[in-house]
Amino acid sequence: MALALDGPATAGELLRRAGLPPSLLELVALNGDNVQLDAPVADGDLLEAFPLVGGG
């Protein structure tokens, strides 16, 4: 999914815009590196989100 940046944005803001509640995510990566939700995102960056996984 591609999202257009209207200006400065953080990983958390973009995830919310994509409909992914940060509370359900286990890991967020930016260009292959683990980041916090307040990490700044620039045009062309790759933002990846990995959900919590349960099992038994």
Image (cartoon, grey):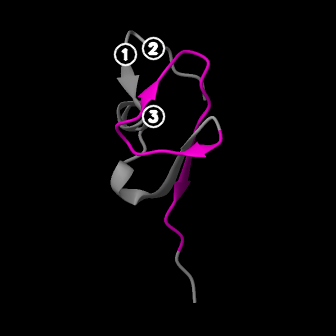
Rendered view: 9 above or below 53: above
Q: Amino acid at mark 2?
A: Leu
> The N terminus lies in which quarter of the figure?
top right
Q: Earlier in the sequence, mark 3 or mark 1?
A: 1
Rendered view: 16 above or below 42: below
Q: Which mark is residue 8?
A: 1
What is the x, y in percent for residue 11? Answer: 42, 35
Compared across the picture, whether 16 is left or right of 45 comes to left
Q: Are marks 1 and 2 in contact (CB under 8 Å)?
A: yes
Residue that mark 2 sits on: 5
Compared across the picture, whether 36 is left or right of 4 comes to left
Circle 1: is it few (<14), some (14-19), or many (20+) Cα within 10 Å? few
State which region is magenta: 32-53
Rendered view: 10 above or below 35: above
Question: Which residue is at the far top?
Answer: 6
Mark-to-mark CA distance, 1 and 2: 7 Å
Q: Earlier in the sequence, mark 2 or mark 3?
A: 2
- Dividing the picture into quadrants, the one containing residue 18 is top left
- Secondary structure beneath dot 3 equals loop
Circle 2: is it few (<14), some (14-19), or many (20+) Cα within 10 Å? few
Residue at horizontal 51 percent and vertical 59 percent from the top:
51
What is the x, y in percent for residue 15? Answer: 43, 37
Of marks 3 and 1, the one in the foreground: 1
Q: Which mark is residue 31?
A: none
Q: Which mark is residue 18?
A: 3
